Each structure stands twice: as structure tokens, then as C-alpha cells.
Image (spheres, rainbow, N blue to C red):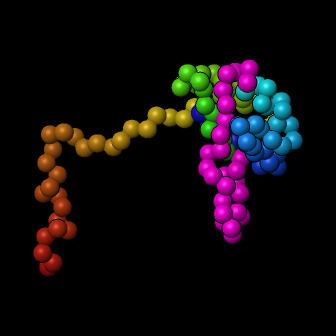
Amino acid sequence: MILRTHQHVRLRVGPRGRIEGDGGDSLARMLRSSGVTVSPLCARPRGGARQAVADLGCYFVVHAASGETDPALADTLREHDLVEFAYPKPPVALPSAPAGDDLRGGQGYLEDAP
């Protein structure tokens, strides 16, 4: 599940997964009562990259001990004042070509130049 807080809130996940920042205690209690934890979606930027990815600091991944989060939890999280949106992360599926088709003939760029 992906969680995004409002940008003006400036929450962060500190050591041992503790949520830090204004109002973070109430969100931490809600997450704890639901049996989930959060981690940042991406690592902190280095050097001059801070400005370019400042918005990514608002995104968190919600982890459940069981491995799967309850989709209804997203509705509960969206009701919190600090949360802009929350949604279940869709499963990742690798693209695949139809099994019976031989696609080698359509690769004309491999032939000699005209």
C-alpha cells in the first residue's frame, strides 16, 4: 500500500520506524492499531538533488506483518488529516508475448542497411 502525506506536514520515518514530525503521533497510533508499519518510498536524496525530489519525501510504503495489507485500510488512512491519499499497490505483472507467435520476422532493423 502507498501512503502520501500532505507536503506541508513534513513527516519522516526516524530510527526504528518511528514517525517524526508535527502530528505524527496520531498517525503512528492509527498505524499501530492497524498492525502496520511504514517506510519511506525512496531514500533521502544526496547533495543538490534535494530540490528535485523533495516531493518524494511525502510518499511511504505501508507494510503489514502478514505480508498483505487490508484494502479497507486505505479508506481509514484517507480519513486522517495528515494523509493526502492512500491506495493499495497494484501487483506487478511482467509483460509477455503470446506464446505461439514467432516475432523474429518483424525485426527488420536487424537486416542489412538499404
Residue 27 occupies which quadrant of the picture?
top right
- Looking at the picture, tell me which residue is in the foreground, 110 or 26: 26
| Residue 26 percent across, percent down from the top left | 83, 30
Q: Judge left or right: residue 78 versus residue 108.
A: right
Residue 105 occupies which quadrant of the picture?
bottom left
Residue 33 appears in view: yes
Classify 104 as above or below 82. below
Classify 107 as above or below 68. below
- Taking the spot 69% from the left edge, 41% from the top edge, the residue there is 4
- Taking the spot 29% from the left edge, 42% from the top edge, the residue there is 96
Q: Which residues, given as a range, are shown in magenta?
A: 32-58
| Residue 3 percent across, percent down from the top left | 67, 37
Residue at the far front: name it: 16
- Taking the spot 14% from the left edge, 39% from the top edge, the residue there is 100
- Looking at the picture, tell me which residue is in the foreground, 74 or 41: 41
Residue 14 occupies which quadrant of the picture?
top right
| Residue 64 percent across, percent down from the top left | 60, 26
